[in-house]
Amino acid sequence: MKATAKINRRILILIHSLGLSCLGGAIFLQILVFMDILQHGYFMAVENNPVILTFEIVLTFFALIYFIYMYQRFIRSIK
C-alpha cells in the first residue's frame, strides 16, 4: 500500500512540475512576443520542423488542461 501511494505521489509531482513548467514557458514566450511587438510593431514565427511543432502543440494542450484543472481546484477551495 505504501509503495503505491509513493508512486502516485511521484506521478502527481511529475505532472505538477510539467504543468507549471508549461505555464511558465507560456508566460516567458508571451513576454518575448510583446517585447518584439513593442520594438518592431509585429511578431512573426515559423516552425519548419514537424516534430518540434507537434511537440509544442501537445504541450500547449497539456498546459491548457492543467490550467483549467488548477483553476477549478482554486475556485472549489474558495467555496
Image (spheres, rainbow, N blue to C red):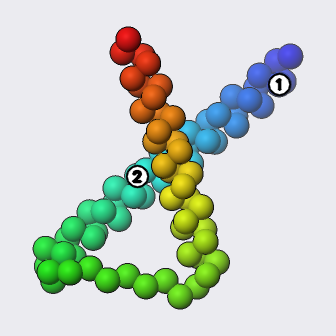
Q: Residue at x 50, y 50 (%)?
A: 63
Query: In x, y percent, where is residue 51?
Result: 64, 78
Earlier sequence position, callout 1 versus callout 2: 1
In the displayed structure, 50 sits above or below 23; it is: below
Other residues around mark 1 within 10 Å, as few (<14) / some (14–19) / many (≥20): few
In 3D space, how far apart are the residues under numbered discs 1 and 2 (Cα atoms)? 30 Å
In the displayed structure, 56 sits above or below 8; it is: below
Question: Mark number for residue 24?
Answer: 2
Snapshot quadrant of residue 15? top right
Query: In x, y percent, where is residue 14?
Result: 63, 42
Query: In x, y percent, where is residue 17?
Result: 55, 43
Viewer can see residue 63: yes
Look at the image and tell me in which quarter the N terminus lies: top right
Which residue corresponds to mark 1?
4
Look at the image and tell me in which quarter the C terminus lies: top left
Q: Residue at x 44, y 18 (%)?
A: 76
Q: Residue at x 56, y 51 (%)?
A: 62
In the displayed structure, 65 sits above or below 79; it is: below
Q: Amino acid at mark 2?
A: Gly
Q: Residue at x 34, y 60 (%)?
A: 28
Q: Amino acid at mark 1?
A: Thr
